[in-house]
Image (cartoon, grey):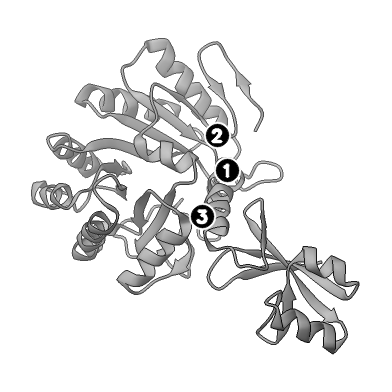
Amino acid sequence: MAVVSAESVSCSDLGCWVGQLPRGCELCIKGLKSVIFVTGICSENCFYCPVSPARRGRDLMYVNDCPVSSRKDIICELIASGSTGVGLTGGDPLVRLDRTLSIIRMLKDFFGSEFHIHLYTTGLLINNGVLSKLVRVGLNELRIHVVAEYSWHALEAALKHPISVGIENPILPGTLEDMKKLILRAHDIGVEFINLNELEFSEGNYLSLRLRGFRTKSGGVAAEGSEELAIEILEWVKDLNLDINVHYCPSVFKDRYQYIRRMQRRALNTKLIYEEVSDGLVRWASISSCPESVVDKLIRSDQAFVIDGEVVTSIRVAKKLGCDFQVVEALPLTPRKILNRL
């Protein structure tokens, strides 16, 4: 995304904003936030929902796209990713309130009170009792996806509790006046921040968006007109000098920055002795042809290893051997997800 040079608003691939970023976004930009998908169950039926068919409506849990089923799974993935906070999402995490409360309590107990936790919901299941429980276990930030009047009731109730409260909605092209009304109403009741996400096409919403006339931008998954509308809204907020923080998050940010920075951190934290790290990937050499005596010597000296039937070593060592080898590129997941063999 090219930098937008307007007197009032300046944007880059990292997004653009008027006022201050929410704490959760500050950590996300640095790759310090992990995503916990608490459940795929949700009472809403938003036509633009990006959740994949494999997860939607299913009571599954993931951390950073890795399936998890236990406390140990969650903690290990967060340690591996070097995270200092998480975002709880779904589905709607509040559909499984006890699970959500247990996760928050566990993370605060293990990582400490400074570990930052935010949660996304539409507010349908929010009431003072739920809010009190969330605050008591340590939730730091509540982000309401405004879909109906009950979302506003949830916001008004949350603003009475000691917690950071904001709105997070996708920017649908053609909704300028609706978004202006939303921002003015949020300003009037004292909402702290509004996050505007660029509308994205996904496996889960592609057909639904196309049937409603939305189109993708050239060479990407973002919807035409979503970014332009977000910029227009930010300039309008700035011109009115509204005392509210508004942040636009472009889809390109997730792929080029947030995801890569998180993967880079995970790669460095989990790097094996024969791997090298670059641009969020791990790379190593897989020896395909080499004298057995040479391979045996490398293995005995811990310079090569047999993994799943392959002899692997560092690219540096492989180049010195003069043997045939492939460079393997993989995502630094557990287990590694191989992308290329070069």
Image location of residue 277, percent across then percent down: 66, 56
Residue with the mark numbered 2: 14
Q: Are marks 2 and 1 in contact (CB under 8 Å)?
A: yes
Residue with the mark numbered 1: 257
Indicate which disc residue 119 carries: none
In the rendered view, does 185 fall on the left or right side of 13?
A: left
Image location of residue 88, percent across then percent down: 33, 54
Mark 2: secondary structure: loop
Q: Is residue 63 visible?
A: no
Mark 1: secondary structure: helix
Q: Nearer the viewer, residue 207 or 134?
A: 134
Residue with the mark numbered 3: 208
Local packing at callout 3 (Cα closer than 10 Å; few below 14, some 14-19, many 20+) is some
In the rendered view, does 249 fall on the left or right side of 188?
A: right
- The mark that comes first in sequence, 3 or 1, is 3
Q: Residue at x 42, y 15 (%)?
A: 238
Quadrant in the picture for residue 7? top right
Q: Is residue 331 visible?
A: yes
Q: Residue at x 73, y 67 (%)?
A: 314
- The mark that comes first in sequence, 3 or 2, is 2
- Amino acid type, label 1: Tyr
In the rendered view, does 123 fall on the left or right side of 256?
A: left
- Amino acid type, label 3: Ser
Front tag of 3 and 2: 2
Quadrant in the picture for residue 62? bottom left
Q: Are marks 3 and 2 in contact (CB under 8 Å)?
A: no
- Amino acid type, label 2: Leu
